[in-house]
Amino acid sequence: MRSFGLAALICAGLAALAFSVGGVESFKSAAATAAPVLLSRPNSTRAIAFESVSQRAEPFAPQTAIPFGLDGRMRVMLFASNLSHSAGETSTAVTAEAEDSTSARYPLTVEYVGAVPGQVWLTAIVGKVNDNLGDVGDVLVGISHHGMSSNRARIGIGHIGGGPPDDPTPTSTPTPNSTPELGSGASLHGKQLFPADNPWNQDISMLPVAPNSTNLIASIGSNTGLHPDFGTVYNGAPNGIPYMVVSGTQTLAPINFTSYGDESDQGPYPIPANAPIEGGRNSNGDRHVLVIDRDNWKLYELYRAFPVNGGAG
């Protein structure tokens, strides 16, 4: 990928960056914990994007000649604001995904993330087009960073046109992907729990039925109801697993494993002394403890957890 001359190539798009976001100053003032924003053309959902080698604009052929490389898949360069890597982060901290007209989703391999020369607020992202994407026309592309998802912008693969409908335009300031609150059972404000390409965030409604689906359902029981373990009471205590949200400065507590220690991260963990325990402090059940570090976006789970020395460990 060539970085020289990049600012000149995108100057036309940058000249109109006042579209709906208030210009460069609004990007500078955005909180570091806000979601990244993919740049699109003025009054359009079409992304500002270039082929990373020739730096030509769309449509992007699925295959292209790569100098000094054997992998001929197209690499597309996108641009985002409010996206800054922490020290030591690699390109894998950013994930990208495309959706076609059939609602099928395809992860794009992110190979480069870096600042645009002379534009400290602007980040370039280079992603390799998925091997299963052919001449599909328009796709909606979005990126995620630290569990926060961007808007989705449109690019043409093979040709321009068609594709899925644009995402709905928010009618008010959205709360998803904002900073979670602190405390027991605190709101996560819709922050996405896993990257966009994680199986838990995939739309499977259009995928074919698994060959072994009938046997799996029969083994569970096709007439068996769900057994939710939340919102109920068992043995006089709330059922379900509570959780607590802490900041990145939470004091770390040592963990003494009496079972399964060889299968666990050794700690210490940011577990507060007052962290809620499944079933209550006097429970004789599973006694799960779940704590979310909102700043490092990491989940800590304990099973059969018992506080030691008043919760110091």
Image (tube, rainbow, N blue to C red):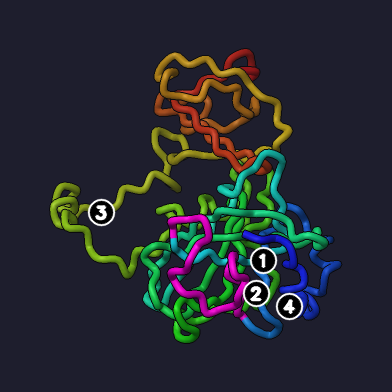
Question: Is 9 contained in the magenta span?
Answer: no
Q: Are marks 4 and 2 in contact (CB under 8 Å)?
A: yes
Determine the CA span between mark 1 and mark 3. 47 Å
Determine the CA span between mark 2 and mark 1. 7 Å
Residue denoted by label 1 = 79
Question: Mark 2: which amino acid?
Answer: Ile
Determine the CA span between mark 1 and mark 4. 11 Å
- Kind of element beneath mark 1: strand
Q: Are marks 1 and 4 in contact (CB under 8 Å)?
A: yes
Is residue 294 depicted above or below 59 in this figure? above
Query: Horizontal and vertical percent for residue 243?
Result: 55, 39
Question: Mark 4: which amino acid?
Answer: Gly
Determine the CA span between mark 4 and mark 3. 54 Å
Name the N-terminal-most of marks 4 and 2: 4
Q: Tell me the quarter of the picture where residue 211 sits.
A: bottom left
Is residue 81 depicted above or below 191 in this figure? below
Which of discs 1 and 3 lies nearer the camera? The answer is 1
Residue denoted by label 4 = 13
Q: Which secondary structure class fits the magenta region best?
A: loop
Name the N-terminal-most of marks 4 and 3: 4
Other-residue count near label 1 (Cα within 10 Å), few / some / many at <14 / 14–19 / ≥20: many
Other-residue count near label 2 (Cα within 10 Å), few / some / many at <14 / 14–19 / ≥20: many
Q: Nearer the viewer, residue 119 or 23?
A: 119
Question: Mark 1: which amino acid?
Answer: Phe
Name of the residue lying farthest toward the right: 25
Residue denoted by label 2 = 48
- Quadrant including the C terminus: top right
Determine the CA span between mark 4 and mark 2. 7 Å
Write the residue at 58% across / 15% down: 308
Write the residue at 41% across / 23% down: 263
Q: Which residues are magenta?
A: 45-71
